[in-house]
Image (spheres, coloured by chain):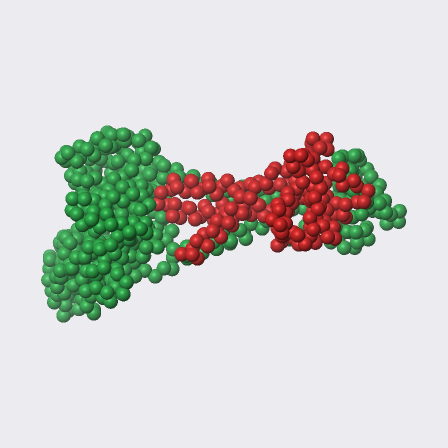
Chain colours: A red, B green
């Protein structure tokens, strides 16, 4: 019984993996335009102190990861540095992808209209929509297990590191009200 | 556990079908020399990103060139400042010494089209099934209480289904189904009763008939609820139907069933199956026809049609039925009589005429029934020819054997001693099942576990389930739209004409639904008689 519950939870976690939604970031390119973007990728970083930091990846230097975050008081961004040794995990979103997680509940409900045939259609729908959502999510993201922290730099705004002549307090998020783009 | 693992594996396998991402698609180079010498197929790189020491960036399109003598990169593109504001667009000449880093990217494939086409295919398939179920809900929902020897089995492995014809209190009846040969161990024998449909089941009583097994014998149950000890089963050496030989399908109780499709012009069209057996000369005992069979979805379709025709008057019609109007008898003698059962004929070798021995009839498309019809003629030997006459598209036959009858036996009846409802002890249920004037009410999703503590432990028994009761079908909104009292009257008063008229609409989804539902069982499972 415990095994069943564990496996069901695991399955649910995999299905819901595709449900991880993020704030719409307009500057992220579609997959077939990746490389033409000028800003860093979006990063969702979890520190060992269980802090969650979300924002544009600015640079990865020898000992720190720099992220430009947005808050109520700093709508155009504030640079935060996290020591590499403090990073517990992250998800890097490098492209804009459609969110297919809505298909899981929708097709579950559709299966209910199949009566006895739901015995067949429900697991098939779960398998396909779960896989689809997860695959769509994975098609535009890297996690720590797939992309090591030392390789993160190439997805930052300044892969060479933050230039010394750049005023760190003058860095702005790529939002129309901040850059005028 | 196995099902969850299967689902889990399915998700994993399907996920791997979507090749979503190459491991590396982005490369960076510290200088022009590295860019030239380390980039595979540099000429095919679509554009170049040049990160400058001052934090700005150039994005050059695929016309860029580099001059190693002057130490410049020249190209058409855009220049952005450190906050990625566009500074200039046009032709640039970028000196190497102001560059911090080059970046190239392999072009990634846009997966949206692949995802969308997968979703389109899934949507179309789902909509087809939904449309069928909405337009013909009779085939998709429900069918009386289902009983299981193993509580984790699904509807495809149901051991029995109870009182399928009893769609109203006045139609209540007791139904006996073979559960097969069961070895009772140290644990008390238990049965699981599920309500897997949109129905309210009113169960009057449940009992188990048991006959101790003697080596070399099995107990057979007749269509008149008698029990016989049978010593031997003889499989046919020839079995022929309209499509040719069907010996492989009807020789063994292996769930490989023989079935036909309905007639396109008349749902009541009949067909014949011819079976030849060889009995040794010394057979002095009585012999009977032992048939493992169940119905297709045709009867479900018709029962649900009848209820849908009643529309919002369903309550009135059932009230009239309960108040003595002979509607139920008319329904039963009309449509049921028109479709008929499986008639068994024995060939008289002297007169060469077919003589009717009896008729098998049991409603329900889920559990396989195993029943016996003893032949009236004694001391048969040599080649015995049997003919089955049955309605096309209505019956599925798993096995058609002859059984050599030893003697009539009386089973011992056991009643449940403990009941769990959805895993919790239900004291009330026991009193309801033991009182002939009360009913156990089971709602959709209910699972009852019935314990029969008085069946002796460490025994081998041939068991039969006796269930008595009736059920109420839940009305669906979309059924109300199908109200048609004229059609209901036609169904009752002129069943032959009605069955001709409905033949085409039934045909439309018969093949698809039958195949999809019954072929969806998990292959490879070894069925035993107990699991039927």
The residue at the point 77 percent across, 45 percent down is A162
- Visible residue check, residue B323: yes
Residue A78 coordinates in the image, percent (x, y) = 70, 39
Residue A41 coordinates in the image, percent (x, y) = 67, 44
The residue at the point 68 percent across, 54 percent down is A85
Taking depth in this image into account, of B19 and A82 the one nearest to the observer is: A82
Taking depth in this image into account, of B108 and B503 the one nearest to the observer is: B108
**A7 versus B61 height, above or below:** below
- Visible residue check, residue B104: no
The residue at the point 75 percent across, 35 percent down is B85
Taking depth in this image into account, of B80 and B32 the one nearest to the observer is: B80
Residue B212 coordinates in the image, percent (x, y) = 19, 64
The residue at the point 79 percent across, 54 percent down is B34
Location of residue B4 by image quarter:
bottom left
- Relative to B291, B155 lies left or right: right
Residue that protrudes farthest toward the right in the picture: B70
* Circle count: 0
Residue that protrudes farthest toward the front in the picture: A49
- Relative to A152, B214 lies left or right: left
Q: Quadrant of the C terminus of chain B?
A: bottom left
- Relative to A66, B112 lies left or right: left
Residue B314 coordinates in the image, percent (x, y) = 24, 32
Q: Quadrant of the N terminus of chain B?
A: bottom left
**A119 versus B527 height, above or below:** above
Taking depth in this image into account, of B320 and B510 the one nearest to the observer is: B320
């Amino acid at each position: 019984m415990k095994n069943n519950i564990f496996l069901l939870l695991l399955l649910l976690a995999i299905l819901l993996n595709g449900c991880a939604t993020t704030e719409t970031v307009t500057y992220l390119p579609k997959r077939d335009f990746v490389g033409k973007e000028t800003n860093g990728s979006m990063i969702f970083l979890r520190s060992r102190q269980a802090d969650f930091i979300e924002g544009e990846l600015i640079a990865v230097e020898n000992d720190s990861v720099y992220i430009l975050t947005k808050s109520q008081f700093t709508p155009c961004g504030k640079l935060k540095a996290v020591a590499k040794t403090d990073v517990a995990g992250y998800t890097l979103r490098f492209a804009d992808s459609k969110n297919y997680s809505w298909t899981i509940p929708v097709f579950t409900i559709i299966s209910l209209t199949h009566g006895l045939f739901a015995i067949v259609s429900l697991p098939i729908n779960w398998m396909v929509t779960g896989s689809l959502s997860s695959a769509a999510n994975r098609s535009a993201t890297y996690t720590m297990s797939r992309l090591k922290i030392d390789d993160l730099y190439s997805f930052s705004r300044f892969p060479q590191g933050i230039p010394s002549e750049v005023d760190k307090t003058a860095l702005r998020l790529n939002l129309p009200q901040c850059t005028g783009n | 556990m196995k099902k969850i693992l299967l689902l889990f594996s399915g998700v994993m396998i399907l996920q791997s079908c979507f090749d979503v991402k190459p491991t590396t698609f982005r490369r960076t180079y510290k200088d022009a020399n590295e860019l030239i010498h380390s980039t595979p197929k540099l000429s095919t790189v679509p554009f170049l990103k040049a990160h400058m020491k001052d934090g700005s960036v150039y994005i050059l399109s695929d016309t860029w060139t580099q001059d190693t003598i002057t130490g410049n990169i020249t190209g058409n593109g855009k220049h952005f400042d450190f906050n990625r504001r566009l500074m200039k667009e046009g032709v640039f000449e970028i000196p190497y010494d102001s560059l911090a880093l080059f970046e190239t990217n392999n072009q990634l494939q846009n997966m949206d089209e692949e995802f969308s086409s997968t979703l389109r295919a899934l949507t179309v398939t789902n909509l087809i099934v939904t449309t069928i179920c909405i337009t013909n809900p009779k085939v998709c929902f429900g069918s009386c209480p289902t009983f299981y020897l193993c509580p984790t089995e699904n509807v495809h492995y149901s051991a029995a289904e109870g009182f399928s014809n009893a769609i109203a209190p006045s139609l209540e009846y007791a139904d006996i189904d073979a559960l097969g040969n069961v070895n009772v161990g140290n644990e008390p024998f238990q049965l699981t009763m599920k309500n897997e449909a949109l129905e309210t089941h009113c169960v009057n009583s449940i009992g188990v008939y048991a006959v101790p097994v003697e080596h070399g014998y099995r107990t057979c149950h007749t269509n008149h609820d008698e029990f016989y000890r049978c010593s031997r089963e003889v499989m046919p050496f020839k079995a022929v139907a309209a499509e040719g030989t069907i010996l492989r399908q009807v020789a063994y109780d292996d769930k490989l069933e023989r079935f036909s499709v309905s007639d396109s012009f008349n749902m009541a069209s009949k067909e014949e199956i011819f079976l030849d057996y060889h009995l040794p000369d010394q057979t002095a005992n009585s012999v009977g026809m032992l048939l493992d069979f169940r119905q297709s979805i045709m009867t479900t379709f018709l029962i649900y049609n009848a209820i849908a025709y009643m529309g919002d008057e369903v309550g009135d019609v059932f009230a009239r039925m309960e108040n003595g109007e002979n509607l139920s008898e008319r329904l039963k003698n009309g449509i049921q009589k028109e479709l008929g059962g499986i008639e068994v004929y024995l060939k008289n070798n002297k007169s060469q005429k077919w003589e009717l021995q009896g008729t098998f009839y049991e409603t329900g498309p889920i559990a396989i029934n195993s029943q016996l019809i003893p032949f009236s003629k004694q001391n048969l030997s040599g080649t015995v020819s049997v003919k089955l006459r049955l309605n096309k598209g209505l019956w599925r036959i798993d096995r058609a054997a002859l059984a050599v009858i030893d003697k009539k036996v009386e089973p011992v009846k056991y009643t449940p001693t403990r009941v769990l409802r959805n895993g919790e002890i239900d004291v009330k249920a026991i009193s309801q099942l033991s009182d002939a004037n009360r009913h156990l009410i089971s709602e959709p999703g209910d699972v009852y576990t019935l314990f029969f503590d008085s069946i002796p432990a460490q025994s081998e028994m041939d068991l039969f389930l006796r269930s008595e009761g009736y059920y109420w079908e839940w009305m669906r909104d979309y059924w109300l739209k199908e109200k048609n009292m004229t059609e209901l009257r036609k169904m009752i008063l002129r069943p032959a004409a009605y069955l001709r008229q409905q033949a085409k609409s039934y045909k439309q989804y018969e093949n698809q639904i039958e195949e999809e539902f019954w072929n969806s069982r998990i292959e490879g499972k070894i069925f035993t008689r107990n699991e039927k």
